[in-house]
Amino acid sequence: KLVFSYLCTMAKIILSILGLISLGLGILGAFLPVLPTTPLLLLAAALFLRSNRRLYDWLMNHPRLGTYISNFMIHKSIPLRIKIVAITFLWLTLLYCAVFVAGHWAFRLFFILLAAGVTIHILSYKTLK
């Protein structure tokens, strides 16, 4: 029984750490177009729900992140402003990489296809009004 209790405690600690990593990457994803913000924030919420109720409550009640997660969970949609900002930064960043960073044409093509794929993915969600 003591071993089971220890394993449960360790699992909760590991899930909390993974949730914090996911949260950090999700926040970075708001500024770096290659990282997907929404899935990482949803993952953080799910991990916190199973490991640390205080962190889950904090995240869901956060003035910006909580609203973002709730809107997506309830409506399965993304606000128009977020779509525009995300797609704009995505294309600016990946076009910069394609033109100034990638040396080989295959890498340039990869960056363009990546931008197109992520754009299609973002646009596949309904727009929250």
Image: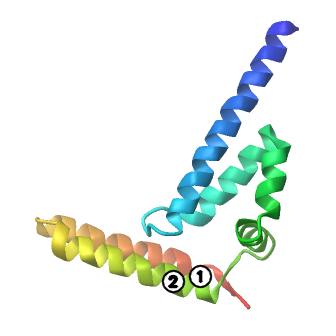
| Nearer the observer, 35 or 61 | 61
Image quadrant of residue 17?
top right
Asked which colour scheme the image uses, the reply is rainbow
Residue at the image position 78 percent from the left and 15 percent from the top:
6
Which residue type does callout 2 highlight? Val
**Residue that carries the numbered disc 1 in the rendered image:** 82
Can you say whether 92 is above or below 105 in the image? below
Residue 125, by quadrant, is bottom right
Crowd rating for badge 1 (residues with CA inside 10 Å; few <14, some 14–19, many 20+): some
Residue type at numbered disc 1 = Ile
Q: Position of residue 65 (x, y in %)?
A: 70, 66
Query: x, y percentage for residue 54?
Result: 84, 46
Whether the residues at callouts 1 and 2 have beta carbons within 8 Å, the answer is: yes
Estimate the spatial distance between the alpha carbons at disc 1 and disc 2, rounded to whole Å. 5 Å
Give the image location of residue 69, x and y in percent.
73, 66
* Residue projecting furthest to the right: 1
Give residue 35's position: percent from left, percent from top: 47, 61
- For residue 44, the mark is none
Please state if 112 lies on the left or on the right of 15 as rendered. left
Residue 48 in the figure: left or right of residue 2: left
9 lies left or right of 31: right
Reading the image, the residue beneath label 2 is 85
Picture quarter with the N terminus: top right
Residue drawn at x 42%, y 79% as measured from the top left? 89
Q: Residue at x 58, y 45 (%)?
A: 21
Outermost residue, top side: 2
